[in-house]
Amino acid sequence: MLRKIVPDPFLLILVGTVLLASFLPARGAFAIAVSWLATATVVLLFFFHGAKLAREQILAGITHWRLHLAILGTTFVLFPLIGIAATKGLAGYLPAPLLTGILFLTVLPSTVQSAIAFVGIAHGNVGAAVASASASQMLGVVLTPLLMSLLAGTHGGAGGLEGMGEVALQILVPFVVGHLLRPWLKDWIARHKAHVNLTDRSTIIIAVYSAFSAAVLGGIWHQLPPSALAALFAIDAVLLALGLAFTWGLGGLCGFAREDRIALLFCGTKKSLVQGVPMARVLFPGGEAGVIVLPVMIFHQMQLMACAFIARGFARGFDAEIRDEA
């Protein structure tokens, strides 16, 4: 029953990390050590991301350019536009760092693992999903910091963004180096896949603890009343509903086959927690980062629950069609 309510048990770990930071925040020398550890794990995370992404995956199915353009356009154009509208419309009603977090959520790239998994469950175009989701993650390393810098600077975001040099050193350079070393690392990564994948979640846990510790010491729970948190849940739900409705409708307008519409639905609406939390720690000051990652964390769980329900529905429909044909 717990799995039905909480499809991803990692959410419980994140909640536990937030509670730990709330009651036992990192202070003094320990906070400095946690900050250095968080930086090191972020660098390692993007190094492995670069090493894991095969160019063959990104180039696979590239001839289906209309589908890939629709997916990437939804991720990096539609969602940011919604984010701009939301932050303008809600200015004055929610704390500024929370508005920045909503905007940050909308400029994040798609996920890879869960998007492809849901497309597979729903009997969609898995090859196209692999190509688009991989390209989204690679483009997000550059586009997410650039979009956030531009939009936060021109639309009233309270970003407090660090210099792009720090972004390059902690995100872009490790990613490029990892990708260049892929020919020599891919076999080792395949043999130690479980340990490499552990980097993703451990990085998030350390980054969340570091960010929330600074936020707690800065008075996060006094800045965010229960009404603001309730509003955030509603905003994330609306964002997800708009994304799902738009991508499914766009697939129909473009005349895509059912398999391609499924790939667009799942890849176009996913937002990466794995890249989002470490990026937030690089892009924003520690106290603000703790608030800014809240929309991403909530949206992550919502998209998992909604997409799991939708994917199972597609799978049942597909099985019924097969039985009818038999």
Image (spheres, rainbow, N blue to C red):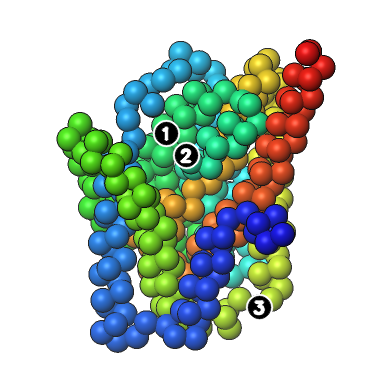
Mark 2 and mark 1 in contact (Cβ < 8 Å)? yes
Q: Secondary structure at mark 2?
A: loop
Badge 2, how many Cα within 10 Å: few under 14, some, many 20+? many
- Residue 142: image quadrant is top left
Q: Which residue is mark 3?
A: 225
13 and 106: which is toward the camera: 13
Q: Is residue 75 above or below residue 132?
A: below
Q: Which mark is residue 112?
A: 2
* Residue 93, percent from left and from top: 67, 67
Between disc 1 and disc 3, the foreground one is 1
Instruction: Answer yes or no: is residue 103 visible.
Output: no
* Residue 266, percent from left and from top: 60, 36
Q: Which residue is mark 1?
A: 134
Q: Secondary structure at mark 1?
A: helix
Amino acid on which the number 2 mark rests in the picture: Val
> On the picture, is 182 further left or further right than 46?
left
- Residue 102: image quadrant is bottom right
110 and 238: which is toward the camera: 110
> On the picture, is 118 further left or further right than 238?
left
